[in-house]
Image (spheres, grey):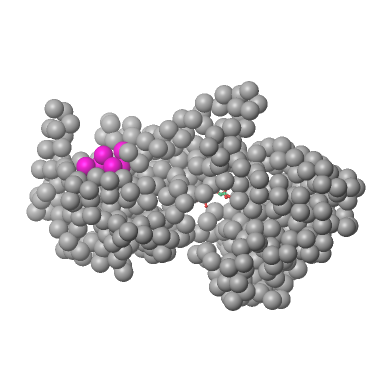
Amino acid sequence: MKIAVVGSGYVGLVAGACFAELGHDVVLVDNDQQKLNALQRGECPIHEKFLPELLERHRGQLLHFTDDLAAAARQSQLIFIAVGTPPKEDGDADLSYVESVAKDIAVAIDDYTIVVEKSTVPVYTNSWIRRIMLLNGAPAEMFDVASNPEFLREGSAVTDFLYPDRIVVGADSERCAAAVKEAYEPLVDGSYYNQPDAIPGRDLAPFRAHLIQTSAKSAELIKHASNAFLAMKISFVNAVASVCEAVGADVEQVCEGLGSDSRIGRRFLRPGIGYGGSCFPKDLLAFRAVARENGLQFGLLDEVVTVNDEQRNRFLRKVKKALWTLKGKKLAALGLAFKNGTDDIRESPAMAIVKALLREGCVITAFDPAAMERAAQEFPDGAVNFAAGPYEALRDADACLLLTEWEDFGALDLPRVKSLLRYPIVVDGRNLFSPEKMRAAGLNYYSIGRPDVTGGRNGLPGKALTEAFEEDQAA
Ligand code: UGA
């Protein structure tokens, strides 16, 4: 099929490359000429597994780049809109980019075309796109608007696209639904997975993607409801972790018992410093705004956000508890990305914690395997030192803070960690180690929802500092 994808951010770039991988003729449209030049030169602007391979495989063959939306729209059967929908002051999504693309498409097309919303948008966006296209002169019989939300996660976006839990196609006419479904046919009939050079994915042979057809409005709601539910799971487990801390239970044990109920499931029950990224925080606010606009109070969503914000403060209190005073303390921050597998620092809880600690007068040396370049742009005045590796960051630090769940951090050589640190203190915001292991390594260890390990080998300085802090708090 001839497909245009408008917007070459995470969603657009991955979708474009993957549609090319499925054998479609794809043109990726963006108005950022620098980005287009970089893509044309063979660069991959984001850190995403398998994406460089797909771009390399299809660039100039089935994947083309342009800033000419009108020409791309005219030559395409399907036009996926994957432009940004940033939050406005009131939390509602800013749909002006979507509107502007819809206008341009309306003016350009001269044959039946399907416009597909791929960006995460509030319910009713589909109807608005339709209205805007009609107002801009596109005859009703010349187009349809479908909703096909994307569920990919950063870090595993390509495999999430090619091996999806579900594909949702929301359309209000059979003709429109059939065309969008056709684009995914190699995943639904399983033929893609038999190709010798298929991108390896989940080990579920023979795999076939499950496609769900819905109305356009339902598809829009599925996306918001899914992200809100996942965020709710994370906030729920973080609130449970706080109860564990208060009563001396172990949240990891609680999660094993809780998640073993197949109705609940183990996934997205990892306690930590809260969710971040460009999706959950924004989508929660947008979903809440949709509810409000329709006269509904969805107070549960408010609580999910409150627990998430509080989780960062709880972590900062743990750092204080471990170190007593913060001013002038030298800290190693391991992790800056909002999660592992990505260089994305948008709404990253790790970045928020680093900034809060800088305000407290700490001296921070950070390391992240992928996100340092982006993070450095946020600290142009050199407020944060960047290390070449995790061990370099640890040298002579008063404590190690684990802020992103990178696998490599969980594999750190603990005796080496201890020997490099000035104080044997690790504050783990992602529960990457077991307390027993840290105790055996002689480290004072503070994690989420589990008892602290203090007074480790050498007895220094964890216990003394913790007791001093607790006395201060009590006073
Ligand atoms: C999320 C959804 O998972 C995707 O399905 C969706 O398509 C995407 O948003 C989107 O709307 O575009 P993503 O933001 O890439 O994907 O990342 P997640 O893997 O969902 O993680 C989000 C945050 O939650 C991260 O900060 C992560 O560290 C945190 N998290 C995740 C936890 O704290 N605990 C968990 O158990 C899982």
Q: Residue at x 19, y 58 (%)?
A: 397
Q: Position of residue 283 (x, y in %)?
A: 56, 41
Q: Where is 48 relative to 318, above or below?
A: below
Query: Observer-nearest residue: 336 or 356?
Result: 356
Q: Is residue 93 magenta?
A: no
Q: Quadrant of the C terminus?
A: top left
The image shows residue 248 at horizontal and vertical percentages of 26, 34
Q: Classify the position of the N terminus by image quarter.
A: bottom right
Main SS, magenta residues: helix
Identity of the residue drawn at 57% across and 32% down: 288
Depicted 442 relative to depicted 200: above or below: above
Asked whether residue 316 is drawn in magenta, I would say yes
Residue nearest the observer in this picture, 254 or 382: 382
Classify residue 204 by image quadrant: bottom right
Give the vertical position of 317 relative to 191 (above or below).
above
Say whether residue 407 is visible.
no
* Image: 316 above or below 374: above
Left or right of residue 248: residue 175: right
The magenta region covers 314-320
Residue at horizontal 84 percent and vertical 44 percent from the top: 134
- The answer to whether residue 411 is left or right of residue 270 is left
Give how far across and how far down residue 372 sits, in percent: 38, 62
Q: 185 and 348: which one is in front?
A: 348
